[in-house]
Amino acid sequence: MPYPYVLLSAAVSLDGCLDDTGPERLLLSSPADFDRVDEVRASVDAILIGAGTIRADNPRLLVNSPERRAARVAQGRAEYPLKVTVSGSGDLDPAARFWHTGGDKLLATTDKGAERARALGLAADVVPLGPDLDWRRLLEHLHDERGVRRLMVEGGGTVHTQLLQQGLADELQLVLAPLFVGDPDAPRLFGPGAYQDGRLRLVETRRIEDVVLMRYEPTAPGTGTQPTAADHHWLALACELADRCPPSRTAFSVGAVIVAADGTELARGHSREGEDPVVHAEEAALAKLDPADERLRSATVYSSLEPCVRRASRPKPCARLILDAGVGRVVTAWREPDTFVADADGSGLLASQGVDVIVLPEHEEQAKAPNRHLTAS
Ligand SMILES: NC(=O)c1ccc[n+]([C@@H]2O[C@H](COP(=O)([O-])OP(=O)(O)OC[C@H]3O[C@@H](n4cnc5c(N)ncnc54)[C@H](OP(=O)(O)O)[C@@H]3O)[C@@H](O)[C@H]2O)c1
């Protein structure tokens, strides 16, 4: 199921706090950074915060710039992004500013929370998601029912922690403010628990007055058949690699990346790479690795087209090479059409041998793009 692109946004003190414990909200960002946040808000379809942030800060969560709001309207979008909050209890102040400013509001909650919220008369669409609040169900709802393609999450720490730990955050925009809080009871950005192994990818740093913005992407592949945000990033890279293939009338252009469980890129390849006019993408990537490399056993192969199951050019098809390498997880964008091989089912072969195969059709168009000359009827 496609989810919105999920962007986590937060500002922290040098000692990692989101706020102090005083009654007023602690201002961590600088004026220019608040303006940047306003710009990001104006670019998204929805903004989400946890109930704890409504209780602590009583925020309005608006796009403040009239020009940015006008630009949204000119593009045929709502003047304000949808405002979303999550609460298990449904116990929120009906007079909070969140409900009475901006455009549409949505409360995602549990069945019990919905009863409470309705009894309180909260001015929002109340969406019960079952006995517990499941983040994947909420993201699916926002994508499918509300048309949300980009979701900005503005905290607090409980919400950020869950989205990152569950592999649902596509990006973290973190601002570091040059001050200390020093209070052991102050809320922290991330709580304890299981995060991805290894390192996130730093994609940008930017000085904004006296604060620094850092943008990170998660890198660790998911496990089993559950896709994570990082799976989407790696598959998009595999699709980009497909664009680098020398064109051919007799073979597909495919890109592949092999990624270790901790998010380390092990190898990449694309069709007809280097001096080899028949090499396939997965084959080219696997050839760069020592077959005894232990990391292969828990690695994920990303391939823009599903690994081939029959081929004339070499004795072993890519699905067999992947099985021989001991790789247990494959993520692909596009099932092989009948163009060269009838009823190719590399995914089926891999799955029958215990490999977890995930097809993410959101990337199919990108995977097909360099192959239009082969598939156009
Ligand atoms: N510096 C920054 O950038 C920034 C940004 C935002 C917030 N903050 C600060 O962060 C603090 C608030 O953070 P917080 O961690 O206490 O609260 P929070 O993350 O805003 O909200 C937590 C609440 O959300 C609901 N919730 C979250 N996950 C849920 C789940 N899986 N199932 C059901 N309900 C769920 C629960 O509401 P119920 O209790 O109603 O069940 C929970 O108590 C405040 O001090 C605020 O100032 C700072």
Image (spheres, rainbow, N blue to C red):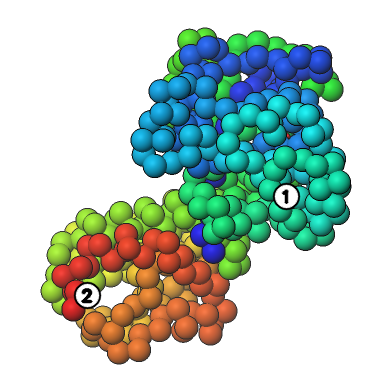
- Tell me which corner region of the image, top left, top right, bottom left or bottom right, holds residue 132: bottom right
- Measured along the vertical axis of the image, is residue 235 above or below residue 24? below
- Measured along the vertical axis of the image, is residue 107 above or below residue 15? below
Q: Secondary structure at mark 1?
A: strand
The picture places residue 315, in percent across and down from the top left corner, at 29, 84
* Quarter containing the N terminus: bottom right
Nearer to the camera, 181 or 31? 31
Viewer-nearest of discs 2 and 1? 1
Q: What's the distance in space between the residues labelled 2 and 1, CA to CA? A: 45 Å
- Tell me which corner region of the image, top left, top right, bottom left or bottom right, holds residue 129: bottom right
Q: Say which mark, if any, is on residue 311.
A: none
Sequence-earlier tag: 2 or 1: 1
The picture places residue 118, in percent across and down from the top left corner, at 81, 48
Label 1 CB sits under 8 Å from any ligand 1 atom: no
**Quarter for ligand 1?**
top right
Residue 142 visible here? yes
User: Which residue, given by chain and number where applicable, does mark 1 sit on?
Assistant: 126
126 to the left or right of 252: right
- Tell me which corner region of the image, top left, top right, bottom left or bottom right, holds residue 177: top right
Q: Say which mark, if any, is on residue 375.
A: 2
Residue type indicated by callout 2: Thr
Residue type indicated by callout 1: Val
* Quarter containing the C terminus: bottom left
- Measured along the vertical axis of the image, is residue 96 above or below residue 301? above
- Residue at horizontal 48%, vertical 10%? 209
Nearer to the camera, 6 or 245? 6
Asked if the residues shown at circle 2 and circle 1 are in contact, with their CB atoms under 8 angstroms apart, the answer is no
- Residue at horizontal 48%, vertical 14%? 32
